[in-house]
Amino acid sequence: MAAGEQQCRDYLQRHRIPELLHRLGALLLYHRPERPREFLIQALERVKAGKRAEGEYPYLMDEANLAAMFSLLDVVGQGHITPAQYREALKTLGLSTEDLQFRDDVNITLDVFKEEVKKKMLESWAVY
């Protein structure tokens, strides 16, 4: 690989550009706005405002989506999922599974699931 190409790759990784583009693309496909350029500009403005604590970061998953995801994981309707299922849900959403605080014998309820996933989503945007 040429030195210039490696410098480009390093730059992209250092600034987390592939992850940012992936998240913006996911938002775009989820919302499917009539004016995609304006939507992307607004999403980036929300990221900037969120970073300054002047607004909220853009969310891909709302409360209803999180509840639906939880119910898919809780197939027998016990009202809780395992930490392993939670970890897989985070991976599916493209969120970090590092620093998870749940022991393997803990059951995760819907409310805890929603709260923790939202926290992880905020953390994921905050790096930009």
Image (cartoon, rainbow, N blue to C red):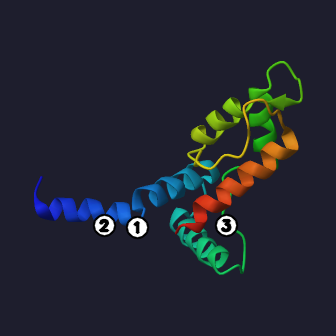
Q: Identify which residue, 55 or 99, lies in the foreground.
A: 99
Tell me if mark 1 has few (under 14), some (14-19) or many (20+) residues whose alpha carbon lies within 10 angstroms of its own: few
Residues at marks 3 and 1, CA–CA distance in whole angstroms? 18 Å
Tell me the mark number nearer the camera, choosing from 3 and 1: 1
Residue at 24 percent of width and 64 percent of height: 8
Vertical order, 47 against 2 (above or below): below
Q: Position of residue 84 (x, y in %)?
A: 67, 30
Question: In the image, 11: left or right of 122?
Answer: left
Q: Position of residue 35 (x, y in %)?
A: 56, 64
Identified by mark 1, the residue type is His
Residue at 59 percent of width and 38 percent of height: 92
Residue 42: assigned label:
none
Residue 15: assigned label:
1
Indicate the secondary structure of the residue bearing disc 3.
loop
Residue lying furthest top in this view? 76
Tell me the mark number nearer the camera, choosing from 2 and 3: 2
Identified by mark 3, the residue type is Tyr
Q: Position of residue 93 (x, y in %)?
A: 60, 43
Would you name the residue on which mark 2 appears?
11
